[in-house]
Image (cartoon, coloured by chain):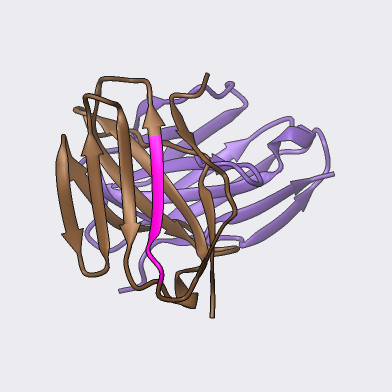
Chain colours: A brown, B purple
Amino acid sequence: QKEVEQDPGPLSVPEGAIVSLNCTYSNSAFQYFMWYRQYSRKGPELLMYTYSSGNKEDGRFTAQVDKSSKYISLFIRDSQPSDSATYLCAMMGAAGNKLTFGGGTRVLVKP
Amino acid sequence: DAGVTQSPTHLIKTRGQQVTLRCSPKSGHDTVSWYQQALGQGPQFIFQYYEEEERQRGNFPDRFSGHQFPNYSSELNVNALLLGDSALYLCASSRQLVNTEAFFGQGTRLTVV
């Protein structure tokens, strides 16, 4: 079983809809939770990170962490075709020196 | 600011050969980590370099080795290439071992034939 599980998708939504992404994990030592966006043939780009449990909002993006359930989510409001990409969750322990990634969810926002 | 730069962008090698990939970190960053991303998968941690030393290593064989130079740039070497080594190799840089805001390069696409 992988440490971090993520539905590969693809997830197809109409423009303007809310995109809902999530990951589950098994390692209770994870303290930092990140979301990356990766366009085809490009490197991952950090969207936001959260420390421990709670919510964090940045523009159209909201990240949620529920450590009791070992479950994290990313919501994208007012989705745009330019949001079409693969979204990767990543996690890190307190030492903060190694990222463990999920497999990524491919998202397609249709005009 | 040039960000993280990797070279080359694409590479084709034959089984059994050796390859060297290069990475220049983002300005102000001193820590470099390498990841392997197979097609359709998430990146997997190979190792991390800080102060010219390997600080942590993932579950990769000794065929994978690296180096960090005094200017913080880094190389990843892979010996005795296997077909399964075909992947996108990503370099990430950060400050002082803290990877909460790691910046990734565009990667080197390695194909082993």
**How many tags in the picture?**
0
**Residue B49 appears in the picture as rendered:** yes
Q: Which residue is at a point 37% across and 40% down the rendered structure image?
A: A90
Position in image of residue B23 (x %, y %): 46, 54
Q: Is residue B72 visible?
A: no
* Side of B28 relative to B85 (left or right): left
Q: Quadrant of residue B32?
A: top left
The boundaries of the magenta stretch are A17-23
What residue do we see at 38% from left, 27% from top? A25
Q: Nearer the viewer, residue A91 or B57?
A: A91
Residue A20 is covered by the magenta coloring: yes
Front-most of A79 and B18?
A79
Q: Main secondary structure of the magenta part?
A: strand
Q: For residue A90: magenta?
A: no
Q: Does residue B90 lie above or below B62 as drawn?
A: below
Residue B64, given in percent of the width and then of the height, sits at 57, 30
Q: Residue A99: where, in percent of width, then height? A: 36, 36
Q: Position of residue A91 (x, y in %)?
A: 32, 36
Q: Nearer the viewer, residue B56 or B104?
A: B104
Q: Residue at x 61, y 60 (%)?
A: B8
Instruction: Identify which residue is drawn at 47% across, 32% down.
Output: A5
Eyeballing the image, is B79 above or below B40?
above
Depicted A53 relative to depicted B93: above or below = above
Of the 4 image quadrants, the one containing the C terminus of chain A is bottom right
